[in-house]
Amino acid sequence: MADIQSVTRAQNIRYDRKTEALYIIDQSLLPNEEREIRLQTAEEMYDAIRSLRVRGAPAIGICAGYCMYVLAKSIRGEDQQVFLKKLSDYGEYLNSSRPTAVNLNWAIRLMLRTALENADCTRGQMLDALYEKAAAIHQDDIAKCRAISEYGLTLVEGGDGILTHCNAGPLATSWYGTALGPILLGTERGLKFRVFSDETRPLLQGARLTSYELQRAGVDVTLICDNMASIVMKNGWVQACFVGCDRVAANGDTANKIGTSGVAILARHYGIPFYVLGPTSTVDPDCPDGEHIPIELRDPEEIKTMWYQRPMALPEVKCYNPAFDVTDHELISGIVTEKGICRPPYTKSLAALSLKKA
Ligand code: MRU
């Protein structure tokens, strides 16, 4: 039986009320080192998100909630208008760290709304309200991941092979994870799955994080390079694909880690169901379709030199390094949220979730 607590020794995001300190596990060091780092300044927070020390759409949102609280505490002076303006500037700054995952913007907006709603309170009351909101975002995500895991588990059977891309497990969320949630929950209940984890070039979240989490949870996991997904599907080893999401548009088009859309195209070719799993905080009702999802472009060095002892390309060679791609809604068999499984047509099933517009 898997022990979920053994997946990581510490919590990926932790606010210590006694010492009033925000800690994250630095995911950029995994799997070789599991180290907590403390985030104190806006610059440290921006850098932690930008450089994927904290990553995964829900985890970025949770972290941003606590960051806003820490930054609110650092604002000196009594004038509420000045306080609100400074907090909003901090929010804008943090929000500019990564553009694709909507959870970052979502959590920052929730925190700013809480500040506005408490504008007439004392400083102490305001800070209490902000802490409560950040903790609620965190607790809600734990409950959402659990519900997503239960719904996702209805889509597979013990013995199934499941292919996943990138990392949408406990490190990327709050607990079970989204795409890995049904696997971890099913394992707890004694089911056996055979998981194929794409290594996920260029930042290797599949190799460094997914295979680490699943191995430690006692799941049968096989690490493959991204270009091996086709052969394992052709071999008949995959009965379902489970992936996470960074932003789901109103028509069901979904942004997730670069390479996800290729997996969906392969799955369609081999007749394998392809599921997207994520909390409703990742659904963006303001975004009509994938064309409107901003795609983050990252440093070419991630392709050419990072991870290698020596550069693996000429320094002057041109590179294109988008961090995400959009999977067309037509390739998606179902979108699993904490409120249930949405099926096509997504314009209808996602609208039925009645998410509020921003
Ligand atoms: O660049 P990353 O590592 O933050 O990308 C993460 C992903 O693409 C995940 O699949 C997604 O955020 C969902 S995490 C539950």
Image: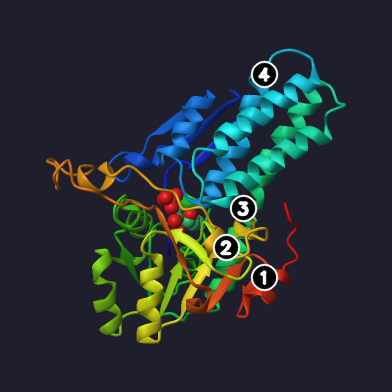
The residue closer to the viewer here, 29 or 227, is 227
Q: Amino acid at mark 2?
A: Val
Residue 143 appears at what percent x and percent y? Answer: 64, 57
Residue 160 visible in rendering: no
Answer yes or no: do the residues labelled 3 and 2 have beta carbons within 8 Å? no
For the residues labelled 2 and 4, the Cα–Cα distance comes to 35 Å
Residue under label 1, please give it. Answer: 350
Q: Amino acid at mark 1?
A: Leu
Count of marks, rendered view: 4
For the residues labelled 3 and 2, the Cα–Cα distance comes to 17 Å
Q: Quadrant of residue 309?
A: top left
Residue under label 3, please give it. Answer: 141
Residue under label 2, please give it. Answer: 248
Answer yes or no: do the residues labelled 1 and 2 have beta carbons within 8 Å? yes
Q: How is the image coloured?
A: rainbow
- Residue that appears at 59% across and 72% down: 151
Residue under label 4, please give it. Answer: 75
Classify mark 3: residues with Cα within 10 Å, few (<14), some (14-19) or many (20+): many
